Amino acid sequence: MTLLAVSVSHRTAPLALRERVELNERRARALLAALTDRTEIEEAASLSTCNRTELYLSASDADAGERVANAELARTAGMSREELGPAIRTLRGTDAARHLFRVAAGLDSMIVGEAEIQGQVRRSYELALSLGTSGPIINRLFQDALRAGKRVRTETGISRLRASVASVAVELARRQLRSLEGRHALVVGAGKHGALTARALMDAGVQTVYVANRGRERAEDLSRRFGGRTVSFDDLAVELRRCDLVLTCTSCPHRILTRRTVAAAVAGRDLVVVDMAVPRDVEPSAGKLRGVTLIDLDAIQHEVKSNLWAREEEARSAAPIIEEEVTSFEHWLAALEVVPTISALRERGRAAVERALRENESRWHSLSDDDRERVEMIARAVISDLLHEPTLKLRQAGQRGSSSLYIQTVRELFGLTA
């Protein structure tokens, strides 16, 4: 089996393409089922965030598995393989594991060290578990990735530099409005990003935070936490007219703010709109309206790139931790390679004992049942002792990652089938 990571991320694709490959839970379920229905792929898990859509696969044939993954991802996005191909980055084996470990630690995020990714990786793993599309390799991969992420956050100073897409978005809005003191802001979406956004707005001195969400109960909970007000999702057009700043972070599959809606709300004044959603919540052409400043994830990414020095210093201190975890996973993976040979070797020994006992059955008619049992025990003990050393050497070679020669030698010496 070969481990594969198939990735479309902020490092390889613009926002317009990333939103086409975004996987909500329904699409993720369908894609994972389609992948594991193929004989080339044994196990599969997906990860989809604002910054990335990735597949982690265990494939019996790496090249064939990659082709299947690319084709299914393109089909899900409604694109051709040729169209999506340049945005896909594929990693194999240890490189695939290292990538997920860095992702879980927040080292590959748009904002290095962001904390939300840990929960997103965990939820992706739980989805694969619930669907039965993961197996021993993917399970161990995600478990080790979550441990690596936790170690990086507790053993380095990267958590002290914690920031989020929301905090950067609020900072960009502050620059446009010169100050957020006394301003009125509308947060559309009451999930985790909505909560982070509301907190960042209050810290920046916003006077009033209005919260809109399709589920009113969640919106009311968030508005209470930050002394804001809940507004109806259906009244967004009206509420826009009260606000200086709008920040959207929903998981809606369609635009919630059209150019026409924003145009009606501006009415000769200035309005800053920050769209943090994938797919985007705001019709992009709304940013061309007079008086409207539209900030999306591409703009946020550009801002993040200009202030990376401190975070990259902490990321460098995390590198040894990641490599320790990768080495541990690599040894575990290599040890798996010897398991079929050990099983075949022990089966050969068991078969040899059974054959010897069967061929000599007619010679033992005078033996008592107790004596017969003793003969069988002795035969099995001799075979077990004979195979102990080859088995031990195979396991040790697997742990060192140098098992190929041992596997080949044992299979040839004992006539084991491939």
Image: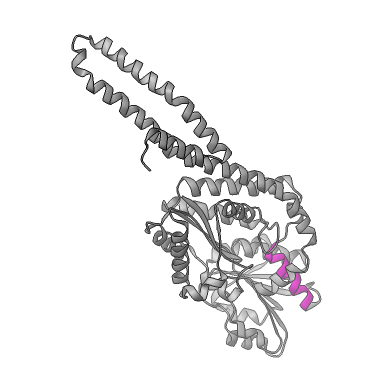
In magenta stretch: residue 209: no
Name the foreground residue: 13 vs 168. Answer: 13
- Magenta region, residue range: 164-176
Indicate the position of residue 357 as horizontal and vertical percent values: 26, 21
Give the residue displayed 50% in from the left and 29% down from the top.
392
Prevalent SS, magenta region: helix
Residue 275 located left or right of residue 414: right
The answer to whether residue 210 of the structure is visible from this angle is: yes
Picture quadrant where residue 359 is located = top left
Q: Position of residue 416 (x, y in %)?
A: 37, 37
Quarter holding residue 192 = bottom right
51 in relation to 133, above or below:
below
Location of residue 351 by image quarter: top left
The vertical placement of 267 against 106, above or below, is below
Q: Which residue is drawn at 23% across and 9% down?
A: 368
Q: Which colour scheme is used?
A: one colour
- Tell me if residue 227 can be seen: no
Q: Where is residue 152 in the image (x, y as percent from the top left)?
A: 69, 48
Residue 167 shown in magenta: yes
Question: Residue 169 placed where, x, y %?
Answer: 71, 70
Out of 406 and 371, give the one closest to the viewer: 406
Quadrant of the rendering where the C terminus is positioned? top left
How many marks the image carries: the answer is 0
Q: Which residue is drawn at 45% across and 75% down?
A: 78
Tell me if 348 is positioned left or right of 333 in this view.
left
